[in-house]
Image (cartoon, helix red, strand yellow):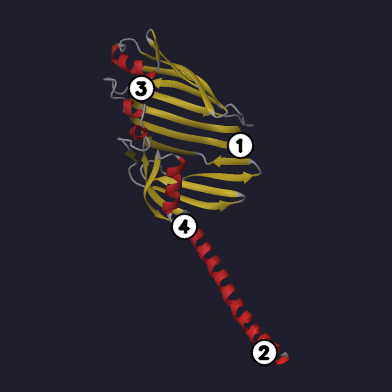
Amino acid sequence: MNAMKAIRRSSARPASKVRAPWSLALLGALLGLGLALLVWAPARWLAWGVAKASQGQVQWLNPRGTVWQGSAQLLLSGGPGSRQPQALPGRLHWTLSPAGSGLRLGWRADCCMTQAASVQAALGWNTLHLQASDHQSSWPAALLSGLGAPWNTLQAEGQLNLRTEALQLHWAQGRLQMQGLVELGLQEMSSRLSPVKPMGSYRIALTGTPEGTPTPGLALSTLQGPLQLSGQGQWVGQRLRFTGEASAAEGHEAAFDNLLNILGRRQGARSLLTLG
């Protein structure tokens, strides 16, 4: 009996020694596979995430490369069933890399940017801080038609000049603080709803304060043109509150009558603009 027990014990020991290397090899293979997936994650995964987060309104078509460095064609759409999606000429290129306690995202569009822009995200306990690089870019206004109503009705044409300066956004416990400036210039704008081309040039500015403000101010002004737009507002929490007006310069009232009826609530010769 003792001899039989000794034989069993001696035969069991080599089996455990054989199994141990195989389990370590499997663990190493799984770790290697996970690292490879992380490093070489295909760009289409990121494209899928963008489409999902935007509910199909922003799509990256024909993605190439990886999540960390790739390119795609930008398409704006009104969502599922949209009849007039608009694609950006050329491709959008991006890089994504770890930076401190967060990530740094850089991007450049072939058609519209002479140099790359970037934003750095820092994650904390119940906080998020975004810091954007100063940059300027110019985009075709026709791209907005892909977003659906009311842009597909207006069929805007012209140039959108985007500028950011010292822009920082900080969220703590769901509350926003904004520093810096986001400015959008609408140059030589026209619409199929008006025979006057161009209607004018305009400026929209979202402004924070040097120390940060929870209620950044929004201002709309006319730079030139027969269609006069103006207004003031604030971004409060997750809502934009804005009041303004649109009117036609003397001698152009009839030409802008249809457009003024669509822009807002008519009050005599003016159209009142209200959001929030």
The residue under the point 57% across, 37% down is 168
Please tell me which of labels 3 and 2 falls first in the chain. Answer: 2
* Front residue of this view, candidates 83 and 156: 83
Q: Which numbered circle lies on residue 7?
A: 2
**Which of the 4 quarters of the picture holds residue 191?**
top left
Give the distance between the C-alpha atoms of the residues marked 4 and 2, in whole angstroms: 51 Å
Q: State which tag comes first along the sequence, 3 or 4.
A: 4
Residue at the disc numbered 3 = 200
| Residue 5 appears left or right of 84 | right
Q: Given this view, does label 4 or label 2 mark the residue nearer the observer?
A: 2
Instruction: State how far apart marks 3 and 1 are (Cα).
Output: 36 Å
Callout 2 secondary element: helix
Q: In the figure, 28 relative to 58: above or below?
A: below
Identify which residue, 203 or 83, lies in the foreground. 83
Q: Residues within 10 Å of mark 3 (few under 14, many from 20)?
A: many
Instruction: Report helix, strand or loop for mark 4.
Output: loop
Are dots 3 and 2 in contact, CB under 8 Å?
no
Residue type marked 1? Trp
Is residue 166 rendered to the left or right of residue 152?
Answer: right
Q: Position of residue 5 (x, y in %)?
A: 70, 87
**Residue 264 seen from this side:** yes
Q: Residue furthest top?
A: 268
Q: Which residue is mark 4?
A: 41
The correct choice, above or below, for 150 with respect to 70 in the image is: above
Mark 1 or mark 4, earlier in chain: 4
Q: State which tag comes first along the sequence, 3 or 1.
A: 1
CB within 8 Å, label 4 to label 2: no
Q: Which mark, by number, is residue 171?
A: 1
One can see residue 115 in this view: no
- The kind of secondary structure element at disc 3 is strand
Dot 2 or dot 1: first in sequence order is 2
